[in-house]
């Protein structure tokens, strides 16, 4: 079972040989973005390509490092992201334009797509992040902000007086 070293994988001998497979593992630089979450660096993809009657199927895991910005407090951090997916390649391009070309398939495109799809749309630095005060911008995770919300003309102030008395 030969292992190839890149993300363009020869499949000529797999087409028409159902069940025959080729393992692969490789890396390529990618740029992907979802909202404020970005991936800009090497993406590693490993998996296998399996022969079918008139096509091949790639099953793979893609991983990279993503840069996140917390939706609530704007803290930035980096963390690994991973996506598992499968992609069929036929002789005619699918809706994303992926196909068998010159007896080869390129899994870099599908892997990048899956990785981008798997990025969180609303990243939070932590589940209970308290975010920034909308009035003064204080990071409420590190210090409470005194001051607002207790204005005497706020409708809640009257209620609070009720409960306090
Ligand atoms: Zn946060
Ligand atoms: Zn404040």
Image (spheres, rainbow, N blue to C red):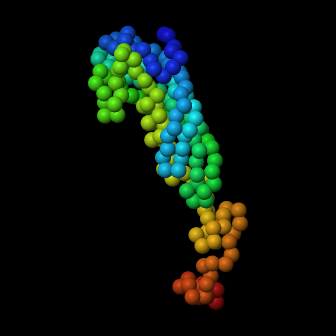
* Rendered view: 94 above or below 158: above
Residue 148 horizontal/vertical position (percent) = 63, 78
Residue 165 horizontal/vertical position (percent) = 64, 89
* Rendered view: 164 above or below 80: below
Residue 14 horizontal/vertical position (percent) = 37, 13
Residue at x 50%, y 10% (from the top left corner): 2
Q: How many marks?
A: 0
In the rendered structure, the answer to whether residue 53 lies left or right of residue 40 reads left
Residue at x 53%, y 28% (from the top left corner): 28
Q: Quadrant of residue 154?
A: bottom right
Whether residue 8 is visible here, answered yes or no, is yes
Front-most of 117 and 128? Answer: 117
* Rendered view: 37 above or below 156: above
Residue at x 51%, y 53% (from the top left corner): 122
In the rendered structure, the answer to whether residue 73 lies left or right of residue 142 reads left
Residue at x 31%, y 12% (from the top left corner): 16
């Amino acid at each position: 079972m030969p292992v190839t070293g890149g993300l363009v994988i020869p499949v000529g001998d797999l087409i028409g040989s159902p069940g025959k497979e080729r393992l692969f593992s490789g890396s390529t630089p990618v740029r992907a973005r979802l909202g404020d979450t970005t991936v800009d660096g090497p993406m590693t993809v490993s998996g296998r390509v399996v022969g079918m009657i008139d096509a091949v199927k790639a099953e793979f895991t893609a991983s990279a490092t993503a840069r996140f910005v917390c939706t609530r407090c704007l803290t930035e951090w980096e963390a690994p992201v991973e996506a598992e997916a499968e992609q069929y390649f036929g002789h005619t391009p699918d809706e994303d334009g992926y196909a068998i070309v010159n007896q080869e398939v390129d899994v870099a495109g599908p892997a990048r797509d899956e990785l981008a799809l798997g990025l969180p749309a609303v990243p939070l630095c932590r589940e209970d992040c308290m975010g920034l005060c909308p009035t003064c911008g204080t990071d409420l995770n590190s210090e409470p902000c005194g001051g607002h919300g207790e204005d005497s003309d706020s409708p809640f102030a009257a209620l609070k007086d009720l409960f306090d008395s």
